[in-house]
Amino acid sequence: MTAPLVGASVRRKEDFRFITGQGHYTDDISRPGQAYAYFLRSPHAHAKIKHIDAGAARAIKGVAAILTGADLAADKIGGLICGWMIHSKDGSPMKAGAHPALAVDRVRYVGDHIAIVIADTLAIARDAAEKIEVDYELLSAVTTPDKAQASGVAQLHNEAPRNTAFQWELGNKPETEAAFKAAAHKVKLKLKNNRLIPNAMEPRAAIGEYDQGSGGYTLYVTSQNPHVARLVMSAFIGIAPEHKLRVVAPDVGGGFGSKIFIYAEEVVCTWAAKKVGRPVKWTAERSESFLSDAHGRDHVTEAEMALDAEGKILGFRVKTLANMGAYLSTFASSVPTYLYGTLLSGQYAIPAIHVEVDAVYTNTAPVDAYRGAGRPEATYVVERVVEEAARQLKIDPAEIRRRNFVRKFPHQTPVIMNYDIGDYEASLNAALKLIDYKEWPARKAEAKKRGKLRGIGFSTYIEACGLAPSAAVGSLGAGVGLWESAEVRVTPTGQVEVFTGAHSHGQGHETTFAQLVAGRFGIPLENVEIIHGDTNSVQFGMGTYGSRTSVGMTAIVKALDKVEAKAKRIAAHVLEASAADIVLENGEFKVAGTDRKLAFHELALNAYTGHKFPTHEIEPGLKESAFWDPLNFTFPAGCHICEVEIDPETGVTKIAAFVAVDDFGNVINPMIVEGQVHGGIAQGIGQAMLEHGVYDPESGQLITGSYMDYTMPRADDLPNYKVGLTVTPCPSNPLGMKGCGEAGAIASPPAVINAITDALGVKEFEMPATPLRVWQAIQARH
Amino acid sequence: MPGVSMTVNGKAVTGEVEARTLLVHFLRENLRLTGTHVGCDTSQCGACVVHLNGKAVKSCTLLALQAEGSQVTTIKGLAKNGHLHPVQAAFKEHHGLQCGFCTPGMIMTAVDMIRRIPDLDETIIRQQLEGNLCRCTGYQNIVKAIHAASLEMKGARA
């Protein structure tokens, strides 16, 4: 018997094409006769469009069309939508400002879309865009959330007075107030969660195509969820009915959330393809990505924790201002609400929690889900405040956490979530061992001798993945269900094709999903093909985000169950035995206790010839599908610990050690899981130390609009991470898995900042911890 | 439009380009060598790295006309006779890639790095990757892959 495939660090099937330059990303596709699109964007943060004169631009040879918001409106093409309804605490629905794909009379952020220029070459399109004259009436701009609700500032949407999209709350206010009255200690922090710009290395791209013969459109697009894109473009935007719109998301070069959303460019390219009678191709330049990809985070928060004399948490109250940018992006409203407030209990048994969130519009790019989406913001709040509580109460940071860990499962928090399983002490202990906590004082002392400030910071995080039980999210405002689908087709010669609604853009699904199938049927890994990302071949699926691959994999398991059951019925006839006596072992269907057997490929052939079983009772063929709706969220959790060393002369901060121990439940491929943890931590350290999306407060210009201004983590900015796993198998899916994609980005920022504030001996400190900020904090101490 | 000719992955090629055409666009659009990627517009990300006369260059930072008469090797020309280059094999073995978009540039940079620097260690590799961005891996496995490939190639030469 060969070693089990599930749980093995199988090398990735998809790697060959990527390491040999044979991937097929959207921009690699070239359609016959294609024209090239360039988007004219607003150079102003806020302005009325009085007039657009494209006459001179249209006259340029090679220009096929220049189309504006007026053309979209004339064709009755709808605007972009936000698909998650949030109700304010007064019961009123959120105030979503209209979001036309091309501006009609007003632009609301630098980079907002004004016109599409379509030409024979990209160079001509760009030249023509420069000839378009737009007459603007400049308006004042509001760029930061703390100013958005003030009187006398710019108002972005008539629908949303005081620039407020919604005022949401969760938890129990009176109980929380009562907890504070009874508290021996109160710990308060002001926190900012800095705006981030996702920066998947592949810029967004779209090719729209229209086939006059069939009346059908095809869109090739950098998407994490092609079916959702098709649904939205069909049902809400009105490009074409679903059966006349094929959306293909081929190889996608990273997403991190930013490619979930349905963006203006893909809508406009698809629509324009029919207008110009040619495929229309657009690929973002990086500077366009900076301007117009949905950004992440951008919260301003005040949090206060009530504790008893022994450091037991009694209550937690949180007030957050969430910057939504200029429009509500596709799932933006869910991020600072149900993906945020529901995680404010952390790993702790907190009796009373109350959170209030005001979501406000500003003249900046829309903010939506970015790796972690709400959960990093929640974790930052909880873990920074708990660490501060430890310092204020003079309790060891590991010990204060131990005193408050949830230890009995299931555990109902005051903020919706029902934690199914976990062992927080186990991951904390493993992390303490990995970092050698006993020797910590010696390391600090040794660093001091060298004139360095050394600090340590903890983060014991929890997140909610496996998005999500459809009825649950429906009751909270989601416009979609969050199940996943799979179809398993066995070919007559015994290979297996798996069509999955999940989408892989770096996660390695082609390997991990194949491990499941090959392991189940005892066939070689290379006999399994994973097909995803094309609405013409895959049945409706929800896509990949929120570390929800456990949902897609469970759908595959359910389909495999059906295939196996049918295969056993067929085998029973062929082998002249009872179906109950057929067992599947090492790729063979056997009559238990005999030497009668069928190899997997023999069974497959029998299923398709239909010669040896009653086809009126058992249909010929071997192909099954399944839709799996998860029973609960899953709750990955763990402990990250960071040690930093600061040079007090320069403020330069080095990560001296970083350990991460995560409980993702059962793991299909440890190598891939470890890679996901590495990448997540890198983005978290990026947020904590390097990255910050900054707008000029007056002009609303994006100051960090390129890799020369926005600090992407580079190889020499980052340490080696020591990672480990603990396992409590998830009870709500048959694989026992929880999800691992976002944990690193969720857990690591508070670990880093807790370490820096420990080293500096300061209470509050704003991300990112640039040398300048650290140096200023050192100077302010004296 | 001016003509340009060069040798790309061992084959003589010619083409007509606008004077402003970048080498990367000539490779991708004219020659359809789409393995070489464009990840930024400021010569920062390194997804477009190819070898020009044996040295790593960012093909977004050269005009196609500047490569006139040159020998260019792209990611598609690295594997020889169906055998992966040791750096390619190491990236797979050590999980040095996730989405794969930065990978062609990373590999071409790594091959050049190993050629130039006989004794690579982790610190040097991290410094040498200054011109290449990856958003997926956190770099740890890329560094591991390059180090492993450098040792293997040194062993093969010895």
Image (cartoon, coloured by chain):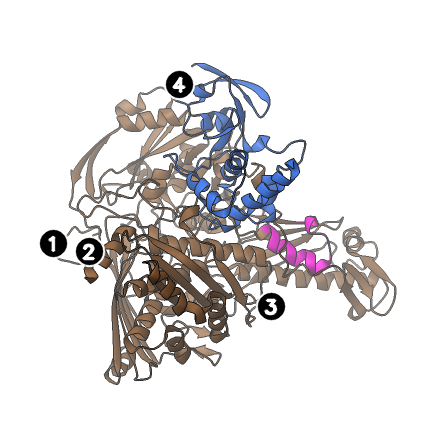
Chain colours: A brown, B blue
Classify residue B70 as left or right of residue A454: right
Write the start and end of the magenta stretch as one range. A510-528
Instruction: For marks 2 and 3, give the CA distance.
Output: 47 Å
- Of the numbered discs 2 and 3, the one sitting upstream in the chain is 2
The three-letter amino acid code for the residue at tag 1 is Gly
- Which label lies toward us, 1 or 4? 4
Taking the spot 54% from the left edge, 58% from the top edge, the residue there is: A673
Determine crowd level at label 2: few under 14, some 14-19, many 20+ residues with C-alpha closer than 10 A.
Answer: many
- Under tag 3, what secondary structure? loop
Residue at mark 4? B19
Residue where numbered disc 1 is placed:
A152
Judge whether residue A707 can be spotted in this image.
yes
Residue under the image location 80 percent in, 70 percent down: A581
For the residues carrying marks 3 and 4, which lies nearer the camera in this image? Answer: 4
- Residue at 50% across, 51% down: B140
Describe the element under mark 2 as helix, strand or loop. Answer: helix
Give the main secondary structure, helix, strand or loop, of the magenta stretch.
helix
From the image, tell me which residue sits under label 3. Answer: A734
Residue A3: x %, y % from top left: 71, 60
Residue at the extreme right:
A595
Which amino acid, mark 2? Ala
Chain letter for the residue marked with disc 4 in the picture: B
Pick the residue in front: A354 or A198.
A198
User: Is residue B22 within the magenta segment?
Assistant: no
State left or right for residue A552 relative to residue A206.
Answer: right
Residue A368 seen by the camera = no
